[in-house]
Amino acid sequence: MRRMALLLACLPLAAQPARAQTERPGFSDTPLLPGEPWRVHDSARPYPARVDPGSTAGAAPADAVPLFDGRSQAAWRGKTGPWMLADGALTVPPRAKGAPSNDLVSVQGFGDVQLHLEFRIPPADGTSGQDRGNSGVWFMQRYEVQILDGVDNPTYADGMVGSLYGQAPPLVNAALPKGEWQSYDIVFERPRFAADGKLLTPAFATVFLNGVLVQNRRPFLGTTIWRKLATYTPHADRLPIMLQDHSSPVSFRNIWVRELPESRGDTK
C-alpha cells in the first residue's frame, strides 16, 4: 500500500486517478454561517464564476455591459438629440440660452451596478464655480455624483467633483487639471422600498475618482435636488443612467457597467 502511494505521488497530475483531481479541501462539520446555507470553510460551497479582467486599467472586463466604446452612442438617447461624437469621445453639445437641457439617458435601465467612465473638463472659458465643467453621473436619473472642475475653482463643498451633489463632499479632492482625462469608478446600490412605498434601505455610492476613494459606501439622503433637502419617492427597481447637460462641453469616453447581484445581506 505504501509503495502504491509513493508511485501515485510520482505520477504526473493528469495520470493520477480522477478522484485525486476533483477532491476539494474544506469541512462539513463546522458551524453554519448566519443566514447562509453554507458552513465555515464549507467544501461544497460553489466557487465564483471566472471573469477575465480588462487587458489594461479601466478596460471593460468580460462580463461588462458596454455603454460607449468610442464609436457609437446607440446605447444612449439625448433628450433633444444626439451628443457630439468625435475622436472617440462624446461631448455635451452647445445649446441656446433658455433651451431645455439635452441630458444623455441610457436606453437600458439598471439597478445595482459597478460603473466606469472617463471624463474631461474643457479648458477655462472665463467661467468659475458651478459653471466651470459642470456635469454629473445620475444613477436611476435621480442620484447624482458630481462632475466639475476641481482645481483652483472654489465652490460649496457638497457641489465639488466627487461629491454626492448637495449631500456629501468627497473625502479628499483627487481632481486632475482641466483638459486631462479623469476617471470615475463607482459602485451604486439602489434603494429598497417595501410594497407600501416605505423606504427600507437608502441608495449607497462607493466612489473612486482617479483611483482615489472619495465616497465610502455613503448613503444618499434621497433624490438629488438643488438648495433643498433630499427625500425619497418610491420608484422602479431598474432605471436609466443619465449624463447631465449643464451647458458645459464636458467630454466622456470608455463607459461600461457591470450589473451586480440584487441580493443584499447588509441592510443597515
Image (cartoon, grey):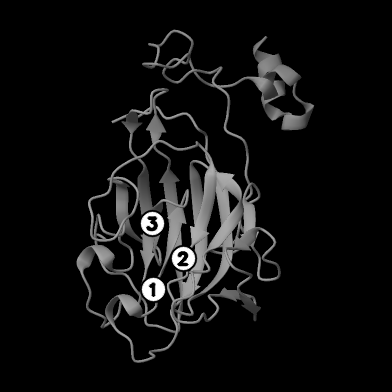
Number of residues whose C-alpha sits closer than 10 Å to that of mark 1, classed few (under 14), some (14–19) or many (20 or more): many
- Image height of 135 relative to 109, above or below: below
Q: Which of the two labelled residues, at mark 3 and mark 2, occupies the earlier sequence position? A: 3
Q: Are marks 3 and 2 in contact (CB under 8 Å)?
A: yes
Query: Is residue 53 visible to us here?
Result: no
| Mark closest to the chain's N terminus, 3 or 1 | 1
Q: CA distance from mark 2 to mark 1?
A: 8 Å
Q: Residue at x 39, y 37 (%)?
A: 191
Q: CA distance from mark 3 to mark 2?
A: 9 Å
Residue 258 to residue 13: above or below:
below
The residue labelled by disc 1 is 134
Rendering coords of residue 152 (x, y %):
26, 83
Image quadrant where one finds the C terminus = top left
Determine whether the residue tagged by mark 1 lies in a helix, strand or loop: loop
Quadrant where the N terminus sits is top right
| Residue 74 relative to residue 226: left or right | right
**Whether residue 192 can be seen here:** yes
Q: Amino acid at mark 3?
A: Glu
The amino acid type, in three-letter code, at marker 2 is Gln
Residue contact at pointers 2 and 1, CB within 8 angstroms: yes
Q: Residue at x 22, y 51 (%)?
A: 229
The answer to whether mark 3 and mark 1 are in CB contact below 8 A is no
Residue for badge 3: 144
